[in-house]
Amino acid sequence: MIYRETGQFKSSYASDQAIFPIVQDRVLVLLGVAAAFVVPPLMANDYWLQAVLIPLLIYALAAIGLNLLTGYAGQVSLGTGGFMAVGAYSAFKFATSFPQLNIVVVFLLSGLIAAGVGLVFGVPSLRIKGFYLAVATLAAQFFLVWLFNKVPWFVNYAASGTITAPARTLLGVMVTGPQASAEARYVVALGLVAVFALVAKNLVRGRVGRSWMAIRDRDIAAEIIGVRPLRTKLLAFGISSFYCGVAGAEFVFLYLGSAETLAFDINLSFLVLFMVIIGGLGSVLGSFLGAGFIVLVPIFLTNAPHLVGLPLPVALQKQIELMVFGALIVFFLIVEPNGLARLWQIAKEKLRLWPFPH
Amino acid sequence: MAGNPTFLAEVLFGGIAAGLMYSLVALGFVLIFKASGVFNFAQGVMVLFSALTLVGLMEKGVPVPIALALTLLTMVALAFAIERLVLRPLVNQEPIILFMATIGLNFFLEGFGEMAWGANVKKLDIGIPDTSFIVHGVQLNRLELTAALTAAVLVGILAIFFQRTKIGRALRAVADDHEAALSIGIPLKTIWVVVWSVAGLVALVAGIMWGAKSGVQFSLSLIALKSLPVLILGGFTSVPGAIAGGLIIGVGEKLGEVYWGPLVGGAIENWFAYVLALAFLLVRPQGLFGERIIERV
């Protein structure tokens, strides 16, 4: 690596437990985050912001949410799409019923609603485990999507059945609605995901995260050492759904603009699950890497044939995309079941020892 | 509900027929889960893929028996490929990783099947007319009856296969304990190929039945999602459970849709099965016939 931690001795528990114990890491990450706020809005064009970076950030937020539940607390969930729908539809109701409400407050409130719904669907987790639970969470997915489809109140009795993000400003800048610039949306999405990623990181370092991991690794042993299973699992469901709910609200307000329930079908749940697995179970960084991978691969697959001068028919392209996607997932699982985050960790360790292999 | 007994009987019959179809798909899941602990999400796509292959071959003018044989061969080849390329490299990984791999497989087969055979809806004619006849005033459907009979026969054969044959015993041994089975000389790799081949055969039967009823198209793979609640209701490891679960879900779903659906705006078929299964699991977490989960530290 270009730097070494030589001479950086930890002399207190606080410094030993820091998120980034090495000064250079800390500085680099801070600079990186600052650059993420400044560089893309200035450099990237609308396509990159709107079709790549904004969905990437929103998916990353949802992936962090699912990762807290599946990666840290060990409860496999296939209901992410449903919880995101709860966030989106409650954000729509809040934003249209209380037009003067700050848009960030709307996001947070819809996250809270999603957390409540998540708690309800988390109750069975005490009795059922593993794949049984995974299938049971599908009940949430199908029921919630059906509910938003059937009850016209959720879409303010719109005949089309779609929800459209109303125009709202934040600090005098238009951030949602058709007039909002891609830059403004990007900065809002980035701000939220940065804050929530930090919160998640601290959550999993602390008592809550440790109790989640204890439940994940061996639930009965955890119970014996005093972790209360129901409380811990429900907390995981609640917090995870909060993240997914906020991501769902952003999904409609900052990315799609308007949506119907189709946007939140089971494929969305799978997509987020892929991000978590490919990025790395039990890693906040992995959620970002996974989201990046899943967002970028289809774009690459769509553009690659054109780059080599081999334009394919759209249908065939779609089929090849499915095949490559499926094969990549299997390949990835075989090569590194612990995900991209683990690869990154290995690379860092190798670089620290370089040029000496041992 | 007792308003019209004939109508009720028809609804019940429809439910049983649909339920047996779910059972057929669920059976494939159970076989694979039992013998390898892999939750095979791709079972639904295997149903679709086998039906697509069969129809594709038949459209090319291949006679039916040869097309059937070729499709079976394809499914066996697929089983070999899956064992070699997916399962073997992932041996000893956590169940969720294997589950994800089968989702990857799901995507791959979906793209592959569509590329090989085209995406339009195909008609599968197996010589049994989709017509109805009337017994005691109750309308019965020939195709559904055939499907029900086929399912029953298939389950019978599978039961004999599991209980009476040498390879069936080996399968049960592997299901109980991989390592112990290996240590007494049961070849795990062969067993996996056999299991996935049998699952492919079950998928083919399910594919033929569903395909004859509603045409071979991509919504066929969605049945997989329908058979999941059947599974959790019946228990992941139980063949009779898959059948009983299928019947309960099929009948419950039809009754729910016909009698309670209109009260809440209809189309509850999508989630009714899941909520039913979920409610049931709260009372009996291991499902109807699943193995009792005993927890020790």
Image (cartoon, helix red, strand yellow):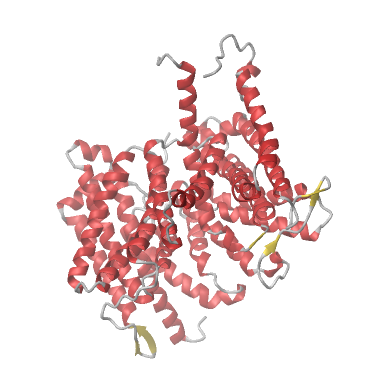
Q: Residue at 22% across / 74% down in the picture?
A: B61
The tally of labels here is 0
Q: Residue at 69% across / 64% down in the picture?
A: A154
Q: Residue furthest top?
A: A7
Q: Position of residue B145 (x, y in %)?
A: 31, 78
Along the horizontal axis of the image, is B156 left or right of B224? left
Quadrant of the snapshot with the C terminus of chain B: top left
* Residue B213 in which image quadrant: bottom left
Q: Please name whichever residue, A303 or B144, is drawn nearer the observer in this view of the structure.
A: A303
* Residue B95 in which image quadrant: top left
Using the rendered image of the protein, determine whether residue B163 is visible from the camera's viewpoint: yes
Q: Position of residue A315 (x, y in %)?
A: 43, 62
Along the horizontal axis of the image, is A161 left or right of B225? right
Along the horizontal axis of the image, is B290 left or right of A233? left
Q: Residue furthest left?
A: B166
A223 is higher (above) or lower (below) than B257: above
Q: Position of residue B85 (x, y in %)?
A: 29, 45
Q: Residue at 15% across / 51% down in the picture?
A: B166
Q: Residue furthest front?
A: A309
Q: Please name whichever residue, A316 or A68, is drawn nearer the observer in this view of the structure.
A: A316
A249 is higher (above) or lower (below) than B3: above
Q: Position of residue A248 (x, y in %)?
A: 64, 52
Using the rendered image of the protein, determine whether residue B233 is visible from the camera's viewpoint: no
Q: Please name whichever residue, A211 or B25, is drawn nearer the observer in this view of the structure.
A: B25
